[in-house]
Amino acid sequence: DAGVIQSPRHEVTEMGQEVTLRCKPISGHDYLFWYRQTMMRGLELLIYFNNNVPIDDSGMPEDRFSAKMPNASFSTLKIQPSEPRDSAVYFCASSSQGRSYNEQFFGPGTRLTVL
Amino acid sequence: AQRVTQPEKLLSVFKGAPVELKCNYSYSGSPELFWYVQYSRQRLQLLLRHISRESIKGFTADLNKGETSFHLKKPFAQEEDSAMYYCALSYSGNTGKLIFGQGTTLQVKP
């Protein structure tokens, strides 16, 4: 298994543009998490899904952010419109309730720069 | 609210010196505590969890409920220990949701 896969690895865009980040969790995992990492705030949980259903989106900063999980093998995090303060590294992670209790497996991250 | 605090953004030590990365949490129930590590150009990964009471790469961490702490320790630091370390708290039963601290960068100098 290649682990959690994220794309793109780097994204540079201009303020006001729409950004879509993608994640493929580890096969068989039933939890998927989206995090944002910044120097100032560290690692923040944005939203997480269980069996493709959003469970807690209280970390989503504002309405410009949205996330979907149309099936067990794919999730997207969308920012529309993007702003310079959204510049960060965005991580996706997955886990399985049935194994390795609470261990989350992280993807390589997407480094987003909004100019 | 549940919170994890790592008071040091950067900890710099010489090779062979003891290391202690501090972690304090706020939670009134029975927490699950974890340390995750991110080496340069690698993914964030689990280092150890308190429930396992294990030593990984020479690191140990003891949960102190009285002081609400879960400090990570190693008696003799190695250069390859240089990385970003995150302390994390789980409190939602089996949902697996984690609350992370802000992270501490450990720099081990030769």
Image (cartoon, rainbow, N blue to C red):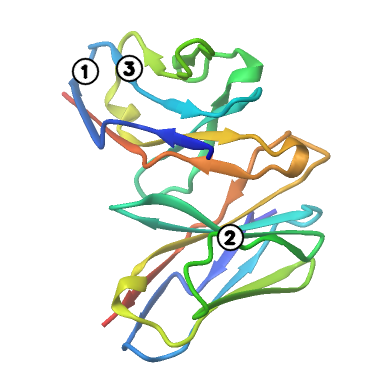
Task: Using the numbered discs, state the Cα–Cα distance from disc 3 to disc 1 in whole angstroms.
Answer: 13 Å
Q: Mark on residue A5?
A: none
- Give the crowd class for mark 3: few <14, some 14-19, many >=20 residues within 10 Å: some
Residue placed most toward the observer, A17 or B5 = B5
Up the image or down, A50 lies above or below A77; here it is above
Same chain? Circles 2 and 3: no
Which quarter of the picture shows residue A4? bottom right
Q: Which mark identifies residue A58? A: 2
* Label pair 2/1, CB-CB below 8 angstroms: no
The amino acid sitting under disc 2 is: Ser
The quadrant holding residue B51 is: top right
Where in the figure is residue B2, as x and y percent of width and height? 53, 37
Residue beneath label 3, please? Answer: B20
Hey, what amino acid is under mark 3?
Answer: Glu
Residue B15 - label: 1
Q: Could you tell me which chain the residue with mark 3 belongs to?
A: B
Q: Chain of mark 2?
A: A
Give SS at disc 3.
strand
Q: Residue at x 49, y 57 (%)?
A: A108
Q: CA distance from mark 2 to mark 1?
A: 42 Å
Give the left or right position of residue A78, taking residue B9 as reference.
right
What amino acid type should be assigned to the residue bearing mark 1? Answer: Lys
